[in-house]
Image (cartoon, rainbow, N blue to C red):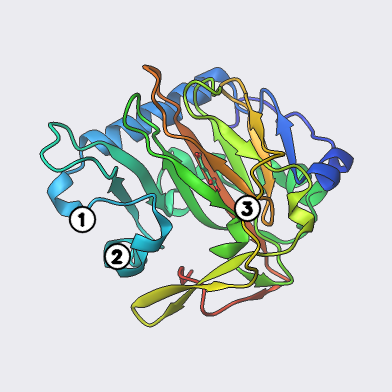
């Protein structure tokens, strides 16, 4: 299903800023296939199966077994919509589309993105987590500032995100925002699993800066390569346009996987 060769990206700009923007990484037919596949998964999903709504407030994830058991399956998570809301929107589908979904898996292989991953410093890349993020019009929730290395820890830190826009993303519909250079400031917190419980371990008391964030406004089909220590976030989508995206997170197999990560890959 490779429609075309993905364009290269600039490793120097990546090293400097902590992210790289690669327009045209997915052909438009591929973008449409992925978006249609996500819609089909969501249409087949019974919201009652999801239990409590998924919350984008990180602290409430701690008690969510539905979340903890999703590392090796394809499962829908609900938006935290107010009680009594007519429609229960899906916030995301996770966390093993890269392994199990016939449409998402071929887009997720390391071979296809080898040059980008190697430019980002991963010579033995392995996908460990993936998610489709809906950001539906009017209901797509905020994603609080975070670093992906909080959730996927290796020593040394190697997690690298490949984030694909499946529609044009801009300030109006809740595009990604990043803190350029913030990947050099170290890891702020870790999300660790102890049995069926999880908790955050704070590594720095410094709050996220208010200033310096930049919007990553990109066209559908664009790939954004995200350094695992780069602070990023997105605002709620209050517009009438969706902002679907697909993200796959890779680690380098030569690094030591931290056994207290929430996810337990096979
Ligand atoms: O798409 C978003 O709004 C957030 C995605 C994200 O945080 C990630 O892929 O790590």
> In the rendered view of the protein, which quadrant contains the N terminus?
top right
Q: Tell me if label 1 and label 2 are in contact, CB under 8 Å.
A: yes
Query: Which marked residue is nearer to the observer: mark 2 or mark 3?
Result: 3
Q: Residue at x 62, y 24 (%)?
A: 217
Q: CA distance from mark 1 to mark 2?
A: 8 Å
Dot 3, how many residues are within 10 Å of its Cα: few (below 14), some (14-19), or many (20+)? few
Dot 1, how many residues are within 10 Å of its Cα: few (below 14), some (14-19), or many (20+)? some
Q: Residue at x 50, y 22 (%)?
A: 167
137 in relation to 236, above or below: above
Q: Residue at x 36, y 77 (%)?
A: 197
Q: Is residue 95 left or right of residue 48?
A: right
Q: Earlier in the sequence, mark 2 or mark 3?
A: 2
Q: Where in the figure is residue 16, as x and y percent of width and height?
A: 85, 44
Question: Camera-side residue: 53 or 76?
Answer: 53
Dot 2, how many residues are within 10 Å of its Cα: few (below 14), some (14-19), or many (20+)? some
- Give the number of callouts: 3
Question: Camera-side residue: 202 or 248?
Answer: 202
Residue indicated by mark 3: 208
Q: Which mark is residue 104?
A: none
Residue indicated by mark 1: 52
């Amino acid at each position: 299903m490779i429609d075309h060769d993905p364009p290269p990206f600039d490793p120097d700009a990546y090293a400097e800023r902590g992210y790289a923007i690669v327009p045209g990484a997915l052909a438009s037919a591929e973008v449409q296939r992925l978006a249609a596949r996500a819609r089909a998964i969501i249409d087949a999903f019974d919201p009652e199966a999801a239990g409590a709504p998924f919350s984008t407030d990180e602290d409430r994830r701690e008690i969510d077994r539905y979340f903890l058991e999703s590392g090796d399956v394809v499962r829908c998570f609900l938006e935290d919509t107010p009680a009594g809301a007519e429609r229960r929107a899906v916030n995301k589908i996770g966390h093993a589309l890269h392994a199990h979904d016939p449409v998402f898996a071929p887009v997720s292989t390391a071979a296809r993105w080898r040059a980008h991953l190697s430019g980002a410093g991963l010579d033995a890349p392995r996908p460990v987590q993936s998610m489709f993020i809906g950001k539906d019009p009017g209901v797509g929730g905020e994603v609080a500032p975070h670093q992906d290395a909080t959730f996927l820890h290796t020593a040394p830190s190697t997690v690298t995100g490949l984030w694909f826009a499946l529609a044009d993303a801009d300030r109006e519909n809740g595009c990604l925002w990043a803190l350029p250079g913030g990947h050099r400031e170290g890891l702020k917190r870790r999300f660790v699993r102890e049995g069926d419980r999880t908790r955050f371990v704070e590594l720095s008391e410094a709050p996220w800066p208010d200033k310096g964030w930049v919007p990553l406004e990109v066209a559908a089909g664009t790939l954004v390569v995200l350094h695992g220590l780069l602070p990023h976030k997105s605002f709620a989508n209050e517009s009438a346009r969706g902002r679907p995206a697909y993200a796959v997170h890779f680690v380098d197999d030569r690094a030591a996987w931290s056994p207290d990560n929430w996810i337990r890959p096979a």
